Image (tube, rainbow, N blue to C red):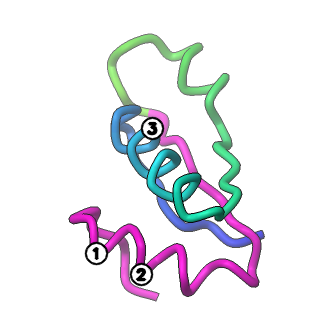
């Protein structure tokens, strides 16, 4: 598993997950429960993980759809 995306914005996680699902790439949101516990102040980021085999393709899908990712 590789970390594809880290953000405090739950809408980006949902959008990215939908894009990846549409391309047949399984994505796994992590830290969802921890970020819910902190309330709505947005200090704990959520992560979106993908299989290592899907990482390059997943990065391409997200960047082609306007989601900025950290440099590798």
**Relative to 12, does residue 67 appear above or below in the rendering?**
below
Could you say which quadrant of the image residue 29 lies in? top right
Q: Is residue 49 magenta?
A: yes
Which residue corresponds to the image point at 36% horizontal and 14% vertical from the top-left? Answer: 40
Tell me the residue that label 2 is attached to: 60
**Relative to 66, does residue 28 appear above or below in the rendering?**
above
- Viewer-closest of 56 and 6: 56
Marks 2 and 3 close (CB-CB < 8 Å): no
- Picture disc at residue 64: 1
Q: Is residue 26 left or right of residue 56?
A: right
The numbered mark, 2 or 3, whose residue comes first in the sequence reads 3
**Relative to 7, does residue 53 appear above or below in the rendering?**
below
Q: Is residue 28 left or right of residue 55?
A: right
Residue 35 location in percent, x, y?
54, 26
Q: Is residue 21 left or right of residue 65?
A: right
Instruction: Measure how far apart labels 1 and 2 are at the Cα level.
Output: 6 Å
Assign a secondary structure to mark 1: helix
Could you say which quadrant of the image residue 56 lies in? bottom right
Marks 1 and 2 close (CB-CB < 8 Å): yes
Residue 44 location in percent, x, y?
48, 35
Residue 4 location in percent, x, y?
54, 67
Q: Is residue 64 magenta?
A: yes
Image quadrant containing the N terminus: bottom right
Instruction: Measure how far apart labels 3 and 1 are at the Cα level.
Output: 16 Å
- Magenta-tinted stretch: 44-72
Which residue corresponds to the image point at 76% horizontal and 71% vertical from the top-left? Answer: 51
Assign a secondary structure to mark 2: helix
- Viewer-closest of 40 and 26: 26
- Picture disc at residue 14: 3
Instruction: Measure how far apart labels 2 and 3 are at the Cα level.
Output: 17 Å
The numbered mark, 3 or 1, whose residue comes first in the sequence reads 3
């Amino acid at each position: 598993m590789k970390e594809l995306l880290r953000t405090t914005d739950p809408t980006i996680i949902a959008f990215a997950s939908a894009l990846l699902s549409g391309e047949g790439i399984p994505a796994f949101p992590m830290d969802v429960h921890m970020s819910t516990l902190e309330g709505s102040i947005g200090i704990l980021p959520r992560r979106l993980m993908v299989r290592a085999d899907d990482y390059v393709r997943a990065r391409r899908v997200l960047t082609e759809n306007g989601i900025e990712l950290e440099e590798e």
